Amino acid sequence: MPGKCCLGSFRFQVLSFKLRGLVPLNRKVGCMAVRNIVKIDQARCNGCGLCVTACAEGAIEIVDGKAQLVSEIYCDGLGACLGHCPQGAISVEKRQAPAFNEQATHEHLAGREKALYAPPLVCPGLTAHTFAPKQAGEVPSQLSHWPVQLRLLSPTAPCFQEADLLLVADCVPFAMADFHCRFLQGHSLAVGCPKLDDAHAYVEKLASILSANKVRSLTVVHMEVPCCSGLTRIAREAIRQSGVDLSFDDVTIGLRGDVLKVQAVAV
């Protein structure tokens, strides 16, 4: 019977999706249908992450340095991410795929938000510290608090109250020999990688920091490589979500550690 054959094929596809990790094993896939769905050209993608923050359903994530559709049931096929890709790597195609699952998408987004505020592990490195300026040594450290990784920072940490906030791509201090004295001195620090880390989580965390504190200024420092400029978009989106009236300085660092450009950005 044709119906029985199609049903068997559908079940095989569902199992294939589950085994590949595209759909959680404990969640049923909706009916297959020919519909619009996002397609990502892996050869063109440079992993900048702009599409990640543009996707309101959380269907796209950076995996191994490339944008990937993490689950077809999270993609509504409307293509809101299309205009945000500088490489033209994203298109919308019509093909057979599981139906968009609005309930599963809401659960997916809620789970990400919950994970954002949950400590990822119990580690002594998560203990908050504040430091007085160090006097000893030829080049004293200007670090004023710990931790510094944006994923681990608490929005209510004392270091953010009326702070001059420095949002830095994690490669920058390795390229700049004078990073501490030129940028870090007198600033509270948040560090992250816009290419390899969760851009959605960074937007939410930074927005929470800005909402909970009277931040005096924000400076974003990133490398000249295209994927690193995603940190600028993260800052813009976080300011919009927080509702604060804040502009920021966007600083581009060359691969040899020189400052290539400083630009004032109004949101």
Image (cartoon, grey):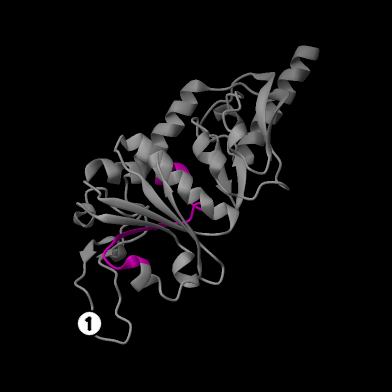
Q: Quadrant of the N terminus?
A: top right
- For the C terminus, which image quadrant? top left
Does 89 appear above or below 127?
above
Picture quadrant of residue 11:
top right
- Can residue 1 be seen from the camera position used here? no
Q: Give the amino acid type for the residue marked by disc 1 in the picture.
A: Gln
Viewer-nearest residue: 177 or 8: 177
Q: Residues within 10 Å of mark 1 (few under 14, many from 20)?
A: few
39 relative to 129, above or below: above
Percent position of residue 239, x then y? 36, 40
The residue singled out by tag 1 in the image is 135
Q: Secondary structure at mark 1?
A: loop
Taking depth in this image into account, of 128 and 159 the one nearest to the observer is 159
Q: Position of residue 195 (x, y in %)?
A: 54, 52
Q: Residue at x 56, y 47 (%)?
A: 62
Q: Nearer the viewer, residue 9 or 48?
A: 48
Give the image quarter of residue 20: top right
- Relative to 26, residue 212 above or below: below
Q: Is residue 249 left or right of residue 197?
A: left
What's drawn in magenta, residue-wise?
Answer: 183-202
Q: Position of residue 72 (x, y in %)?
A: 61, 30
